Amino acid sequence: MGFAQAIGGTRYSFPDLRTLLARATPLRSGDVLAGLAAETAAERIAAQRALADLPLRHFLNEAVVPYEADEVTRLIMDRHDAAAFAPIAHLTVGGFRDWLLAAGPAALAALRPGLTPEMAAGVSKIMRLQDLIAVAAQCRVTTRFRNTIGLPGRLSIRLQPNDPVDDPRGVAAAILDGLLLGAGDAVIGVNPATDNIETTIRVLELLDAVRDRYAIPTQSCVLAHVTTSLLAMERGAPLDLVFQSIGGTEAVNRSFGVSLSLLEQAHQAALSLQRGTVGTDCMYFETGQGSALSADAHHGVDQQTIEARAYAVARVFDPLLVNTVVGFIGPEYLFDGKQITRAGLEDHFCGKLLGLPMGVDVCYTNHAEADQDDMDALLTLLGVAGVTYIMGVPGADDVMLAYQSTSFHDGLYARAVLGRRPAPEFEAWMERMGVAATGRDGGQIPAGLAPALIGLG
């Protein structure tokens, strides 16, 4: 079965759903690189019009990656909830857009099991930025481990104290910097410069010692490979969250060295530790548009649809946090600030719609056509859209990963102008410590700061 649409006297044909979705995607460099993008704006509009007229039921009858060849496709199809889908089963993609814009939090939450990621990606392709923001702002996703993340009116921050040589003094200094500026309620998470078991355990012990000494109601994580985390748990390391980068096809996950069964093994191991105090959500996933193409594992599917499929993998494991590192892979996939902005809002929308606690690393690499003004704009738009959490990096410049992100001060800005507050348990802790955690009064640190944190370094 193919699809066709005429625009301005020219008839455009799309042989299958995979091609239709790719041609309907707003322009981005990764799809051009893959040879999947519409060749002209007219062809893109034709594809979007054809997509808008497509019945949602069609997504259940045609897989963009073959069922027999891909465990992610099997996961998506086998777990689809027909009863949850029933309220929208009669709609086209265009009608679904209208339905979403009128829906409230309860209806959106009830719909989640009935949605496939391809449906979410498809409707996002015909939505304006304000549509993506308006719907995402109505999606409520709450998770818990040592604090409660995702409540309305809250904005959490991952404290990212990376060090280029995993020096404990450098990590500790960045932690102190972040805590004094209200960051860390999402997680205190370190990307290790060297992914080996000795480094992982050393940094885990440092993070846990800081958390325990100052009774911080948050969770820590070393973003090592899942197999390293499994080994760390076997050795008795104080591991809170299991981290893993994931993608939307079996092949891209294989390139990351993981499978659904391995993720399930790690999930069960982390649950068995029972380290959470207010909840048991103990997985942390990162994703990003372009990872499948860079691994030649995209099966001819556009990068945004593949990204949405990664969220189907994530939601199986009830994660505490999911983060799209939206501009990290580089301009080969998202060329400039405009493409990064669109992708960040798409990812956040699709993740929240599918029921995930979505954060966004508002970021870019130094060779992208983007700057911090672009990041300020995206940060603000995501804040309006109700993003669950953002990154807090010293000076917005990650000296280990060599990319530009958002700073602790950026988090204070977003909380102040949007009236957002940290996770409630963390906010109470910050108040006890005498730190302005929400950006009130200009985000100043009180002169009479309690001395408890001063010896951290």
Image (cartoon, rainbow, N blue to C red):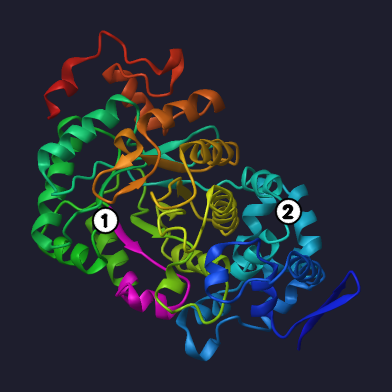
The amino acid sitting under disc 2 is Leu
Q: Residue at x 70, y 76 (%)?
A: 20
Residue 259 in view of the camera: no
Q: Which residues are magenta?
A: 241-263
Of the residues under marks 1 and 2, which one precedes in the sequence? 2
Q: Residue at x 38, y 27 (%)?
A: 427
Could you say which quadrant of the image residue 156 lies in? top left
Residue 411: x and y in percent read: 42, 32
Residue farthest toward the right in the current orientation of the protein: 9
Residue identified by numbered label 2: 100
| Label 1 secondary element | loop
Name the foreground residue: 381 vs 373.
373
Q: Does 251 appear in magenta?
A: yes
| Label 2 secondary element | helix
Residue 10: x and y in percent read: 86, 76
Give the quadrant of the N terminus. Answer: bottom right
Residue identified by numbered label 1: 223
Label 1: how many Cα within 10 Å (few below 14, some 14–19, many 20+) = many
Above or below residue 107? Residue 55 is: below
Above or below residue 444? Residue 27 is: below
The amino acid sitting under disc 1 is Leu
Tell us which disc is closer to us: 1 or 2: 1
Residue 382: x and y in percent read: 55, 41
Q: Residue at x 16, y 59 (%)?
A: 194
Q: Residue at x 22, y 57 (%)?
A: 273
Q: CA distance from mark 1 to mark 2?
A: 35 Å
Give the quadrant of the C terminus. Answer: top left
Residue 255: x and y in percent read: 34, 76
Above or below residue 77? Residue 159 is: above
Determine whether, in the image, residue 289 is placed left or right of residue 83. left
Name the foreground residue: 244 vs 102.
244
